[in-house]
Image (spheres, rainbow, N blue to C red):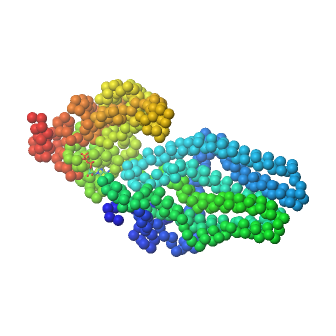
Amino acid sequence: MGGRRRGASRRITSRKGVFNPEDTKRVKHTRIGVWDLYEEKIPELERVPGLSRLERFLTLKQTLPYVWRMVKDIGSIRSCWLLLTLYLILDLVGALVPAAVLWYKGQLLTIVQVAVDSRTVDKSLLVRVTFGMWVCKILTRLLKYAKSHITLPLKARLKQHYSVHLFAARARLDVPTFEDPSVQRQLDSASHVNGQSVAWGTFTMLSGLVTTAIKVVTQTSVLARVLKDQQDGTLLAVVSLVPELVQWMQWQKVTLHGGEQGLCEASGPQTSLFKHALNRVGDYADDFYETYREYRNREQLGPGIFLRDSLSELPQIAFALRAVQQPAFIPVSLASLSLIQENTSSLTWAIGRFFEQTGSIADQLATVRKLYESSHIPNRIRDGDTPFPEDTQKVHAGISVEFRNVSFAYPGARSFALKGVSFKLEMGQLCVLVGANGSGKSTILKLMIRLYDPVEGQILIDGKDIRSLKLADLRQAASVLFQDYTHFPLSIRDNIALGDPAHADDDERIRLAAQLGGSEELVDRLPDGFDTYLERPVTDHYSGLPEGTKTLFGRPVDYNSVRMAGNMAATAATSLSGGQMQRLALSRTFMRSVVSEDSQVGLLLFDEPSASLDPTAEHDLFVRLRELRGNKTMIFSSHRFGNLTRHADLILYMDDSSIVESGTHEQLLRKEGEYARIWKLQAQAFL
Ligand SMILES: Nc1ncnc2c1ncn2[C@@H]1O[C@H](COP(=O)(O)OP(=O)(O)OP(=O)(O)O)[C@@H](O)[C@H]1O
């Protein structure tokens, strides 16, 4: 179809090996509307009956140690003990109730049989049976009620427990590892499956598996006992079971292959072409999974379906034939037939569910493995083992930095972001990086705190190879403000305090940091001051009625008072300007590096810290930072010439991933190169 673009293929099969969409022997390609569906064909060997199931069970065996670990972990959450025990007891009792109901129904059958034989009714048995059935009904209702009340807190506690694990697993990853799409997928599938947490999904699946097994065993044995003495009971049971079995086998055929598909997502058309494209793709212009589900669930025709339809009337025919032969047994046979049919369908459903669960159990348990392995994903940036700094007092005078012939390309990028970069900065010096967009300024700062490692060359910090230093120590000694800083859905106080979490409760330090970062005044003007939330940390859900309208009975629809609830009404993010947000980010940086006398930060890195600041704020900021010279080593990336460059000990002028000029402001002006040209260009604007 013209005008449709397809992205890279994404493999979602659990089968091992490389998924190659071009390999028509192994991969089947189907077009469903806008979607290209790639399904792995089942290899010939796997057509051997039972082999694919064997493979699943073997895979399952590998995951058992992880499941055992999860069981132990869940068992170690003290706040879950009571709820877990209650949940399991309720599940167990719930699994026994259907067999009890079946037994009582069998007793009813005996009462009918005796009535047919002797024309008498055992009234006390009838009362006991009726009472028993009533108790079962009430018990089922109570079990359901109790379970629904336990589920909510239990689910939340398990989720909370594992969210800490997942948070730690993500937080320990370095940037190149975290940015890897395969790692992202692993983290995603370790956090939730089908909309629920891995721990809860696995727990309910395992308990469901046990209860299904209990139901199957108890119901089958009760049914066998009940039918033992019934005339035609066995015959009717067999003929009732046959169509259900046929249906189950059909259904098995469909579900066994579910989930073994790869897919290629088509990227959406441009907005202007959207309507046109929608008309062209017609019925299949839907979300992939929705389209795929419909495609899979299309009504199928086949010999099995026709056989099942033909056999479904078998029990009634068998019953009619026996009734003609022995009219006296009509009531008993009729009651047996209804009991058998009701139970065979519920049993086949339970057995089907059992096998469905064993079919998907390998996939579910594989996610448990992913969950635990997520905290062992190897980082690409190897940690060093030399503590830094050796002398903490020395850090207060700054840190020396040297780049020796450093080259670097971002993972997956074809071109170098830095080529043969060399420079040296002494302790306490001020360095300014200038140059065109994309020339590599931010990259230098990123390499300095080892967000990435150079492809070639060496970076030395206080004369030591940066790779030999302990990562945590290195990052503790440096403070960075990147262009694309993040604000969190917390109060302004907490956003600033994040710069130095150890002093998060020290309001004085936070205020001082705000003052240095130039945000104190603007925060004080906000109605909730430092308690103002930058972004609401909660999501509001309202009824479907649109605000500003009236209900059917004339009541105005206004959710404002609800929005004010929870003391989280004030949100500054939407009302603060870009420059004001930058001042808050600066305040956080100062909280970390400047406010405290005891700060261990010796290297300050700023990527365009004044890009959104007004001239006064920029001037104040640079004056403040210049005062720190001799105390800290500072490196700035900037497009503005003058304010800082005139005071810099070293200016690096970058172009096309390399340093093309370096020196002080005066030296570079004398050189009359590119730096001097742009300086004059900027200066002319003010003449
Ligand atoms: N995460 C990334 N992945 C791939 N390439 C990147 C990435 N970040 C930057 N680059 C590329 O590396 C080169 C250098 O980028 P860098 O951000 O260091 O430039 P810069 O001089 O700081 O630019 P600016 O002045 O616009 O901030 C650019 O060509 C850019 O496209």
Residue 402: which quarter of the image?
Answer: top left
Residue that protrudes farthest toward the front in the picture = 553
Q: Quadrant of the image for the N terminus?
A: bottom left
Report the side of 591 relative to 421 (left or right).
right
User: On screen, 164 above or below 270?
Assistant: above
Exactly how many numbered labels are in the figure?
A: 0
Q: Position of residue 40 (x, y in %)?
A: 47, 67
Of 478 and 585, nearer the camera is: 585
Report the side of 444 relative to 234 (left or right).
left
Name the residue at 47% across, 57% down. 290
Report the side of 256 relative to 105 (left or right).
left
Of 624 and 567, nearer the camera is: 567
Q: Position of residue 481 (x, y in %)?
A: 31, 39
Report the side of 433 relative to 85 (left or right).
left
Q: Position of residue 389 (x, y in %)?
A: 36, 39
Q: From where the camera sits, is residue 606 visible?
A: yes
Name the residue at 56% across, 56% down. 365
Of 46 and 574, nearer the camera is: 574
Q: Position of residue 455 (x, y in %)?
A: 31, 55
Of 3 and 432, nearer the camera is: 3
Name the residue at 14% across, 43% down. 678
Q: From where the camera sits, is residue 633 visible?
A: no
Name the residue at 33% across, 33% down. 575
Q: Quadrant of the image for the C terminus?
A: top left
